[in-house]
Amino acid sequence: MRRLAVVTDNPMMVGAIRAGMCDGRAFQLLGYLDPRRTTAIRIKDTGADVVLVDEANCPDRAMELIRAIKEASEEIAVVFLAMQMEDEMLERAFDAGASSVILKAIHPGALATFLEEALKGNIVHAPSAIRASGEIPETLSTEQLCLTPRELGILRLVAAGAANSEIAQQLWITRQTVKFHLSNIYRKLGVSNRTGACYYAHLNGIMAGVGEDVGLATPAGGPAGSEAALVASAS
């Protein structure tokens, strides 16, 4: 289990990340540090293997902290939480030493999955790489995709971080039926696995309008962010 520390001064981020890490299966959440008061040495002393650094309102300060963390310990993986996935911001974050960048519009329930896959190197590197690989097709509406209401519901649950057993229990169907629907969803989306489907749902706004859908940067119960929930990796 990886030990995770979070650098943010946003109470909403604290609550969203805590909700996203509540199962405790992949990450042990050590705590939160204020970016205005913490130092790289203090972060290293927490014993964290992974550090989430929030862009907050001062990306320059965040970049300086990322660079200092990597100078203090090359063993710590640093993930940058950004509001927008812009090429310039990606380059700055990776140059500073971040191993991955995650948009804060991602659903809290999917955070642990995206973070784990990014740290394993299983997440595509950048939006341009996605198109080149063919893993994510051009943007299509739910009508164009011809997803049935049941498939759309399952896709939304997958993108919210639900496991097959949880989906089956919530929809009163068997896990085998969930797998059957997922295979159809993958085929229609043009993806090969759960991560690709989750990515597609966030990227194309399929989560929009779901009452319980909130991004990391959105207050609980509020509307979901409009940004695409992308993940980029430096490796």
Image: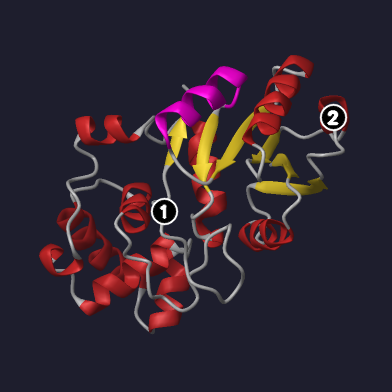
Circle 2 — which element? Answer: loop
Image quarter for residue 45?
top right
Q: Indicate whether 175 appears above or below 134.
A: below
Q: Earlier in the sequence, mark 2 or mark 1?
A: 2
147 sits left or right of 196 in the view: left
- Check disc 2: other Cα within 10 Å, few if <14, some if 14-19, many if 20+: some
Q: Is residue 92 magenta?
A: yes
Q: Indicate the quadrant containing the N terminus: top left, top right, bottom left or bottom right.
A: top right
Residue at figure coordinates x 21%, y 30% from the top left: 132
Residue holding disc 1: 227
Image side of residue 206 versus residue 23, left or right = left
Percent position (x, y) of residue 195?
Answer: 38, 48
What segment carries the magenta color? Answer: 86-98
Q: Is residue 81 magenta?
A: no
| Residue at figure coordinates x 81%, y 49% from the top left | 31
How crowded is the residue under tag 1: few (<14 C-alpha within 10 Å), some, or many (20+)? some
Identify the image's colour scheme: rainbow, by chain, secondary structure or one colour: secondary structure
> How far apart are the two marked residues, 2 and 1, measured between alpha carbons?
30 Å
- Type of residue at label 2? Thr
Instruction: Provide residue 176's location: percent of width, then percent of height.
Output: 31, 69
Residue at image x 24%, y 44%? Answer: 136
- Please, what secondary structure does the residue beneath circle 1 have? loop
Q: Position of residue 35 (x, y in %)?
A: 78, 39
Amino acid at the residue labelled 1: Glu
Residue 39 tag number: 2
Residue closer to the observer: 139 or 112: 139
Chief secondary structure of the magenta span? Answer: helix
Given residues 26 and 60, the one toward you in this image is: 60
Is 47 positioned to the left or the right of 71 in the image?
right
Q: Which mark is residue 185?
A: none
Front one among 157 and 37: 37
Residue found at x 52% / y 61%: 215
